[in-house]
Amino acid sequence: MTIVAIIYDSATHNTEIMAKAIAQALESEGLDVKLTHVHEAKIEDIKGIDGLVLGSGTYHHEIMPALEVFIEQAKNVDLKGKTGAAFCSYGWSPEVVDLITNRLKGFGMNTIDGLLIHEKPDEAGLAKCREFGKNIAKMIKGE
């Protein structure tokens, strides 16, 4: 079974909405998805996975603090060669996706371009989330 963990933090629920749409797309591609809010996530959740997708809102131009702590702990898990991706809902500052992607690359993960949605995703934004999920699935499957 191919397993993808989606770990996210969401102060306004916008990133959560994105996470759920991405998860649905991954599941529609036949992947097993573990969708977890970072406050409920354990580092064991990412051991033995095939893909790691991290989502964050923007907090003063930075990754949300709880997700930052989780990422710091994740450096102790062997993720080399796995698929990694980042997504972000933002109001003012979109650099969080690049910050997360760079951390995933630092773990030796194969990454795809991150997904940015300004504030709450509308139908077009949700379509982008679903497409993002399908692209992650293709990368994991080697398509």
Image (cartoon, rainbow, N blue to C red):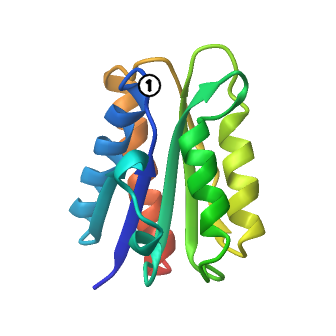
> Which residue is found at the position 55% from the left and 71% from the top?
83
> Which residue is found at the position 31% from the left and 23% from the top?
123
Q: Could you say which quadrant of the image residue 93 lies in?
A: top right
Q: Position of residue 114 (x, y in %)?
A: 61, 46
Q: Is residue 33 above or below residue 40?
A: below
Q: Position of residue 103 (x, y in %)?
A: 73, 58
Q: Which residue is mark 1?
A: 11
For badge 1, the amino acid type reads: Ala
Picture quarter with the N terminus: bottom left
The outermost residue toward the top is 92
Residue 65 in the figure: left or right of residue 119: right
Q: Residues within 10 Å of mark 1 (few under 14, many from 20)?
A: few
> Which residue is found at the position 66% from the left and 14% from the top?
92
Q: Is residue 23 above or below residue 11?
A: below
Q: Element at badge 1?
A: loop
Q: Position of residue 105 (x, y in %)?
A: 74, 65
